[in-house]
Amino acid sequence: MSYIKINQEKIDAKIAQDLIKLCPFNAFEYEDAYLSINASCKICKICVKKGPDGVCEFIEDKIIPIDKSLYKGIAVYVEQHQNHAHHVSWELLGKAKELKEKTNEDVIAVVIGHQMEHISQEALNFGADQVIVYDDPCFEAFNVEIYTNVMEAFYQKYQSNIILFGSTPLGRSFAPRVAARLKTGLTADCTMLDMTKDGDLLQIRPAFGGNIMAKINTPNHRPQLATIRYKMFNKPSLCEPHGTISIESTENIRKQSQITLLDSLDKPRVKDISDAEIIIAVGRAFKKQKDLELIEPLRKKLNAEVGCTRPLIENGWFDPRKQIGLSGRTVKPKLIINLGISGAVQFIEGMKESELIISVNSDPHNRLFDMSHYSIVGDIYEVLPQLNELIDQILEVNDEL
Ligand SMILES: Cc1cc2nc3c(=O)[nH]c(=O)nc-3n(C[C@H](O)[C@H](O)[C@H](O)COP(=O)(O)OP(=O)(O)OC[C@H]3O[C@@H](n4cnc5c(N)ncnc54)[C@H](O)[C@@H]3O)c2cc1C
């Protein structure tokens, strides 16, 4: 990492005061005749350029190029709980297969647990080239310390180029530990992935409050680690297995931990909109909470769930679990009807994979129209009753048939 070095032998009280005045970030501290730089330093280099000659020096980080040919394989950590794999793992496996087309690296499923035969076979059925299994009674329940030891053992042996984790509560605690252990970085909460022909992973995620999509590339470090939100990619279709399963020895893996599992309680699954097949999404076009009653006939006819944009949560009109978007839930329904929603990037990121998108907005230039299969320009207060009538007519015709 680049940094500013202070040549202490050139420091006296006056020079220290001059530098303290010069720094726009108040990064200098002078105590006991010693000048130090605190965490506020932004390495703007003003002290180097405008400070007394030779007192502050900019030390540039030397980038040591790595031999990328030593790192091969797109590994996916297959998250499981009580022998059920989390669906995000298969979505990531599907994406890994797509990335493989760029560099022809093996897609490796890493399975950790006890009695993992079923999950290992599932990974093969979803098209993994290699399934690497660490099966041991000590791995039955997730323990972040022990699992990190396992992942380290995996990396030491296989030197994979990439390791992907789901952005689940478990993945979000596990991946940073693995990154720290392997002395590499981690891009959290990616929404898209791509790959260069050199095997550099392009990790794409919203940044600056969702105002830009940042493309993060780590060409000088391996392995490349990322966590990815669920429902961003499609689960691959089942295929004729062609890969291999390797059961790894767990003998040399440290199984002691400072964490003791006393008990494990299953949290009752609260139904939210993530799994809904039909969603009516409502936005700030609704002027009063009472006006939401207008969607009831349509909701009942379609047996739909209702989701909303963030301002409606902030108004206290809905339970936060109903919010669609970056800071809410990701949905992938068969049908979503957007009513009076502007299509901010934070909302779109949460629903862009929906199969059929219908949007209603009074603004003909509404951003959601670009991605909608059907767009209706109009006032929701007028369009909604008409939509209701239309659905009635369709249902009647269906009944007659
Ligand atoms: C860090 C961060 C995270 C965020 N996360 C999320 C998130 O997860 N989900 C989310 O939704 N937002 C999120 N936001 C907020 C987001 O930026 C937008 O402000 C929000 O999505 C806008 O909601 P809206 O479309 O309902 O409202 P508006 O932007 O006000 O849009 C209202 C729309 O209704 C239309 N309209 C008005 N009256 C009518 C009418 N009578 N008939 C038809 N159309 C009409 C207007 O043309 C307009 O398009 C986040 C913001 C930040 C900074």
Image: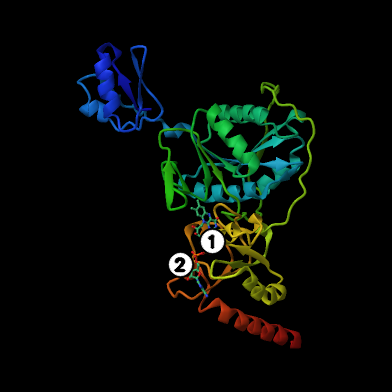
Q: Identify which residue, 271 or 158, lies in the foreground.
A: 271
- 191 up-or-down from 27: above or below: below
Where's the C terminus, which quadrant?
A: bottom right
Which mark identifies residue 352?
1
Give how far apart the Cα atoms at labels 1 and 2 are.
12 Å
In the rendered structure, the answer to whether residue 303 lies left or right of residue 94 reads right
43 relative to 133 in the view: left or right: left
Q: Is the N terminus in the top left, top right, bottom left or bottom right quadrant?
A: top left
Identify the residue at horizontal 41%, vertical 28% (top origin): 39
- Callout 2, which amino acid? Arg
Image location of residue 190, percent across then percent down: 52, 47
Which residue is drawn at the image coordinates 64% and 42% (left, top)?
Answer: 169
Residue in front for this viewpoint, 363 or 229 = 363
Residue 367 disc label: 2
Q: Check if mark 1's residue and mark 2's residue have beta carbons within 8 Å.
A: no
Q: Residues within 10 Å of mark 1 (few under 14, many from 20)?
A: many
Residue 307 visible, this angle: yes
Which residue lies at the image location 50% right of the left edge and 28% below the top edge? 183
* Foreground of the two, 251 or 26: 26
Percent x, y of residue 137: 77, 30
Q: Tell me: residue 185, above or below residue 349.
A: above
**Label 2 beta carbon less than 8 Å to ligand 1:** yes
Query: Residue 105: x percent and y percent?
Result: 51, 42
Labels 1, 2: front one: 2
